[in-house]
Amino acid sequence: MMQELVHIEPINALTTNSMIVEALDCMEEHKVTDLPVVDESNKYLGMVSEDALLNAGDDSGTVQTALNLAYSPYVLTGSHPFEVLAIAAQYRLSVVPVLDHEGGYVSSYLLSDIVELFRDTPTLSQPGAILVLSIEESQYSMVTISTVIEQNDAKLLGLWMISPDHSGEVKFILKLNVQNSSPIVSSLQRYGYVLDTVHGDSSFELDYQNRYRHLMNYLKY
């Protein structure tokens, strides 16, 4: 269960009648820039941001004046951490509201607690090379990538898709459990994968510099 993986913060929601100055004080207390708003029956209405409250222009006014009902991101109880992180990233939230299946407000996840969960995973905590690669969409194969990595006596700790530079292209990040990634890069390049950048692999940089020097020496003659 999500609740067992990530700490759920007992943040009280604002109401439409909450004073703006009180809402800002609450944000300062929790070190967040967003807070959920509910009606009198605890039904979730949406999120209000610090910027919206400050732009309301009257600290003595109510949250109602700064509330945009169209701005209502949330997750349901039991959602996976990936779902929570996706909502937080999509809406740039510091707090992700948790609702029950009837639309009632339950509590909230702090972005800092979600990040803490991923920080402790082997994907991020274990040392290893990080490769950024791209390939034509029609040629992309997860099976090929995994096979190449394992044939080079390594393990794939994580793979993230990122926005491609061109239409019809797949761009992604690989995290390996080894720091010497040169053999893996060479194998993937034979399958048409293009290496964009390498991080966490000093041997790769040294190998690249050696090849460059050999090329320069060759061109002199």
Image (cartoon, helix red, strand yellow):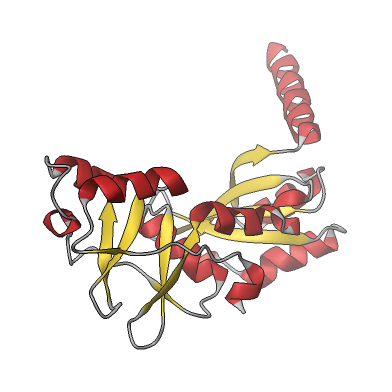
Residue 188 vertical position relative to residue 139 in the rendered view, above or below: above
- From this viewpoint, is residue 10 visible? yes
Q: Which is nearer the eye, 7 or 149?
A: 7
Report the residue at 63% width, 54% height from top: 116
Q: Is residue 184 left or right of residue 143?
A: right
Q: Position of residue 12 (x, y in %)?
A: 40, 64
Q: Quadrant of residue 99?
A: bottom left
Residue 26 drawn above or below residue 38: above
Residue at 28% x, 78% y is: 43
In the image, 70 versus 158, the foreground residue is 70
**Res 33 visible:** no
Q: Between 105 and 133, which is closer to the camera in this rendering? A: 105
Q: Among all residues in the image, which is located at the extreme bottom?
A: 102
The quarter in which the N terminus is drawn is bottom right
Which x, y percent locates residue 18? Answer: 23, 58
Q: Is residue 115 left or right of residue 61?
A: right
Q: Residue furthest right?
A: 153
> Is residue 61 left or right of 124 when viewed as pictured?
left
User: Which residue is depicted at the point 77% across and 43% down?
Assistant: 182
Expressed as whole percent of the image width and height from the top left, the position of residue 87 reads 41, 64
Rendered residue at 73%/13% (across/down): 221
Residue 58 locus on image (x, y percent): 12, 42
